[in-house]
Image: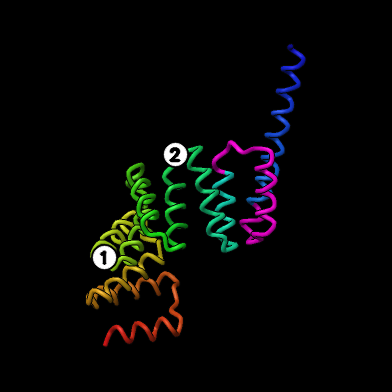
Amino acid sequence: FALLLTGATIQAQTRAASARSYLERADAFFAQGDYARALRDYDLALAFDQSTAAIWNKRALTRERHNDGPGAIADFTRAIALAPRTAVYLTNRGRAWLQQGELEQALNDLNRALALDAACAEAYAHRGLVSAALNETAAAIADFDRALQRNPKLIHTRFNRGLACLRAGRHAEAERDFAEFRKQGGRFTLAQQAFFDQLRK
């Protein structure tokens, strides 16, 4: 029995080591922007370890880079099942639902994330986008404010706040937001600039 137990322990340790090895390499590929190789190695890591929520979350993020929204949501769901009180996983799935146009599911996940972590700037930022998509401009601006209070460096949230203020007729605030957006390195496309000019009229 002791020999069998030792063998099982060694096998488990070997599988864990293999998972870590593939995970580390996948993380390196992801950081380099090589998402195809990252996805392959996350697949291999999961072949050895399906019980670690972080691996599912990381593969989901990689699937997002491949524009595989449904696949990303499926992986975020696996991560949440393993770690249901991790706000970042709920925030990530909420963002993925939003990108798929599933606003109700997105709002549910983001509210759950904020119930777990009221300081999660990204959850407020994405919930603001849900409100904007629902034409609830005041609620959107309020959430963008909450996000920026917690993380002033969320450059795209600054842009989104400016756009929401512009739609609300709060032009002075919008101009300040866009100025801060540019100050932090943001740039408008020609189409965006034309759109803003039209809204200002």
Magenta-drawn segment: 28-54
Residue 136 is labelled as 1
Report x, y in % for residue 126: 38, 59
Which quadrant of the figure contains the N terminus?
Answer: top right
* Circle count: 2
Residue for badge 2: 84
Q: Horizontal placement of 130 versus 69: left or right?
A: left
Local secondary structure at mark 1: loop
User: Amino acid type of disc 1?
Assistant: Glu
- Magenta: main secondary structure equals helix
x and y, in percent, of residue 17 in the image: 70, 35
Question: 163 or 187, which lies in front?
Answer: 163
Q: Is residue 52 above or below residue 154?
A: above
Label 1 environment density (alpha carbons within 10 Å; few <14, some 14–19, many ≥20)? some
x and y, in percent, of residue 54 in the image = 55, 43
Q: Is residue 53 left or right of residue 124?
A: right
Determine the residue located farthest toward the top in the rendered image: 1
Quadrant hosting residue 129: bottom left
- Measured along the vertical axis of the image, is residue 94 above or below residue 162? above
Image position of 168 (left or right of 115): left
Instruction: Residue 45: say if magenta.
Output: yes
Q: Amino acid at mark 2?
A: Pro
Residue at position x 38%, y 46% from top?
Answer: 113
Instruction: Determine the CA span between mark 1 and mark 2.
Output: 29 Å
